[in-house]
Image (tube, grey):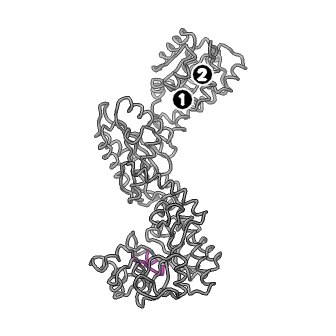
Amino acid sequence: MRDISERDYRMIRMKAVETQEILLHTPARSDGADTVSRLLTEDASAAPEAEQAAESLIMMIDDEPINIEVLQTFLRDAGYKKFVSTANPLEAIDLIAQHRPDVVLLDTVMPQMSGFEILKRMRNDDAQRHVPVIFLTPSTDSNTKLKALELGATDFLAKPVDSSELALRLRNTLSAKAYRDRLANYDAVTGLPNRRCLMDRIERALRDTAHAGAMGAVMQLNLDRFKQVNEALGLNIGDSVLKAVAMRLELALRGSATAILDASGPVQPVLARLGGDEFTVLVAGIGKVENATPIAQSLVNAIAGPFRAAGEEVYLTASVGVAVFPDDGMEAGTLINNAGVAMRQAKEQGGNEFKFYSREQNAKSLHWLSLEGELRRALDRDELRLFYQPKVRVANGRGSGAEALVRWQHPERGLLGPGEFIPMAEETGLVVPLGEWVLRTACTQSADWIRAGLLVPRISVNVAAPQFRTQRFPQTVSAALEDADLDPRYLCLELTESAMMEDATRSIRALQELKEIGTRLSIDDFGTGYSSLSYLKRFPLNELKIDRSFVMAVDTDADNAAIVIAIIAMARGLGLAVCAEGVETRSQLALLKRHDCDECQGFLFSKPLPTEAFAKLLGGAAPAAMDGQAAAIPSA
């Protein structure tokens, strides 16, 4: 059937209510036609209903060809134009599957196969289960009708068929179907086609492509950081933003697609919402791959401007992935999956852009999928390890603490660094249980060392943004300390500035709770994200860590040196200690020392050490030196 406008939709809803009452309470007899006519003739000539009749495909199955001719004549007079029919009941099921009619008029008594058997087979087929069936029966026997209802018949018409009753019952059956289809195939929030409807459209486009040798594209769009909008403003405001997003995308597609023509005329894209903040676009007949580029770019551009929500300006960006058919697949599920792979690559690279699918990306996604399952098992199989990288006082070269860093002792691939699995953990949400494991293990290990009589410094633990966003994170920290029986002064939590700035007001509350617990708080990778100085001074922090990207060239690049010097001065003004990451040369250390940096860490002092090696360092077994090995570390 044709797509349904909102005006049609409202009318369908009203008619569906009427239809339900009629189907429940009106006897299916010729002598009841006057009652039916009186109830259903209101607005019978309305334009939407006329369009509905013209677009609907009616299938007739009757072993008497003359009956089919009579029915078709009646239906043409009522405005119906599309028909498929058969007098052979044995081919009925195949024809239904081939033509996918909107309603079936089915005779009850036929040789070789009865109408009951055809209906039973339809209801056992997922694709035909919900096709409306109006039984044509000469019988007024209630048992016959009961059997048909049990098998899933929609309505009845008594033979000989009255033309008025046929038109009215068919009209209302189609109206009820249209309303049901609307609920089943369209998103309730945006009114766009949903996944089910989109899959059907893609399959149709692929069939057309196979016949015509044309080219098309499926584009997957995901809103970057939309979760924060829902968390900050609530789901109702979030839904309003999604409606505005849908409108912008529709306008963008209307503008960009008109410039792309193929042999059949202008491209008509289909915009659908799959759920959450994911939208999908189908564009058939793009002619060549390059024609997908301006459409994808128009989607990215459409989201870039601010949205008004709850009196606030909300800024969003979008990541878009493009899969082209037939090159990237000829199945709907494959194309959506491949477009999703490309979309995730765009998101990994910062979002606000589009990417075309490549097989290399898919190989990476398959690898990540396998790695995700292995990492979940690794948490249960005790395959994770903590390494400790010492932190050193710049003034005297003495150890002042250490940062706990996770490694994965993979059973087949050996020891894996964080770069090989942390990005995947962040993408899949595994970083939350992984982060809690690191937190609890570091607390437990520190407590064990203290009980063993070692001089234990403060241990820093990285906190991922998804972990910090959980509502009970302060309680998780408190529980880890309590379970380990560790004094909170031995723990420092390192959070990135971007994690704290996602919802600054909430972050201040959470940081205050952590401060009250007694832990030390550090802002990690400073300078790589977006910070508001007005918020920075309100965060109850103890320490600021300068990102290694600034430190690595601080002795050779004047701009980097200026940035580092400015950060140290700012931290001093805010009463924060300063730690520089990634120190590898004496000249870098000399500059940091001249400008009163408090602490530093890096390969100049020590690489990250396994638990046993770090314990020996705490016990004084390792020699104190400034090159290649950390100095002996006293408790901080």
Q: Is residue 195 visible?
A: yes
Q: Which residue is mark 1?
A: 175
| Callout 2 secondary element | strand
- In depth, the one of 594 and 1 nearer the eye is 594
> Which marked residue is nearer to the observer: mark 1 or mark 2?
2
Residue 148 position within the rendered picture, expressed as x and y whole percent measured from the top left: 67, 23
Q: Which residue is mark 2?
A: 134
The residue positioned 31% from the left and 42% from the top of the image is: 289
The residue positioned 48% from the left and 55% from the top of the image is: 368
The residue positioned 46% from the left and 24% from the top of the image is: 50
Residue type of the residue flagged with mark 1: Ser
Residue 490 magenta-highlighted: no
Residue type of the residue flagged with mark 2: Ile
Q: Is residue 517 left or right of residue 423?
A: right
Q: Is residue 34 visible?
A: no
Residue 36 sits in quarter? top right
Real-space Cα separation, disc 1 to disc 2, in angstroms: 14 Å
As displayed, is residue 174 above or below residue 33? below
The span picked out in magenta is 535-546
| Callout 1 secondary element | helix
- In depth, the one of 278 and 32 nearer the eye is 278
Residue 616 position within the rendered picture, expressed as x and y whole percent measured from the top left: 54, 83
Residue 538 magenta-highlighted: yes
Q: Are marks 1 and 2 in contact (CB under 8 Å)?
A: no
Q: Earlier in the sequence, mark 1 or mark 2?
A: 2
Residue found farthest to the right: 143
